[in-house]
Amino acid sequence: MTNLEALEQAVLGSRQAFEGLVRPYCRRLHLHCYRMLGSPFDADDALQETLLAAWRGLNTFQSRSTLVTWLTTIATRVCLRMISQRQRRTISSDYGPPLSSTSDLGEMVMGPVWVQPIPDAELQAEAADADDPASILSRRENVSLAFVALLQHLPGTQRAALLMQDVLGYSAVETADMLETSVASVTSALQRARATMATRSAAGAEVARLTVRPALNSVLDSFVSAWERRDIEAIIQLLAEDARFTMPPLPAWFHGRDAVALFFEERVFATAWRLVSLGGNGQPGFACYQQQDDGHFRPGGVVLLTMSDGQIIAIDSFLDRKVCQRFGMLEELT
């Protein structure tokens, strides 16, 4: 069945035909919603609302635009409405200053507060130019935790303008049409968005640099070994001087090699751990299982690493049980 035939059947009420039409674009739409909203769970809601709106309005689709452009338009408008109704997602450094003592980590701040990671399994497949280092780095940057977190500082329209033009590749004319505004407005929004992103990046957001795979694997292996052996000196050797350790939904975080090392020594290494490799946001990471009083290892959190020049510049640990489940962590490591 051709797409045109499927479209005709979908307009006549065939749910199966509709699902076949939109299925190839769902992952792309979900990722767009994730970037806009900063949470894969919010993106789930946005995607469902997008598909429902598309199904109900399918008879209004006009072939002057592609189906994916029409769906992206709906998804963007859904996200803009959600942004206007909810507080923006944040990261630890936006929430409060770093700690210098490990004695009190505070109480967990639950709810739709934090920027959350997305499993690599939910990202789009690599393009044909997967062997091009510049292309690989560009894709990683466009889904990295740092990039998604920076986006949350932008007003909704600026967020949409930047993503639609700088990430998805739409022109100013196409973006203006999708957002139902003028080219001058989206051009201005894009300029302001780029300026804000550049300013905040310069103010301290980490910049990951592409690491040769064998070297990266060596660092990751050393990190796992050091953590599981509770070897603080080995951990220190892997950290950049301005390394950061966050742990949402706990608001506490540590900044600087010495502070992060102190947290490892006094709190993390108080119990035994087992780490299992995983990936999220195009970054290396681990499912971290903590030994409980009964001797069993159960989910302690999902950790993603940000690397630069062969050193670890950020350790973002997500303790939320929902995040652990999304990354496929087992209830107990056997």
Image (cartoon, helix red, strand yellow):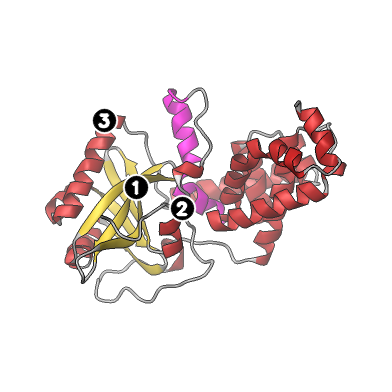
Q: x%, y% of residue 235? A: 18, 51
- The residue that appears at 38% across and 69% down in the rendered structure is 250
Rounded to the nearest angstrom, the CA distance separating label 2 from label 1 is 11 Å
Distance, label 3 to label 2, CA atoms, is 25 Å
Q: Is residue 150 magenta?
A: yes
Residue 35 lies, with reference to residue 270, above or below; the image says above
Mark 2, residue position: 117
**Residue marked by disc 1:** 285
What residue is shown at x 28% (from left), y 56% (from top)? 333
* Type of amino acid at the residue the image marks with label 1: Gly
Q: Quadrant of residue 71?
A: top right
Q: Is most of the magenta stretch helix, strand or loop?
A: helix
* Residue receiving disc 3: 214
Quarter of the picture containing the C terminus is bottom left
254 or 48: nearer the viewer: 48
Looking at the picture, which amino acid does disc 2 mark? Pro
The number of numbered discs placed on residues in the rendered structure image is: 3
Q: Is residue 175 visible?
A: no
- Magenta region: which residues? 130-153
Horizontal side of 107 relative to 30 (left or right) equals left
Q: What is the number of the mark on residue 192? A: none
CB-based contact (under 8 Å), mark 3 and mark 1: no
Few, some or many C-alpha atoms within 10 Å of disc 1 (few <14, some 14-19, many ≥20)? many
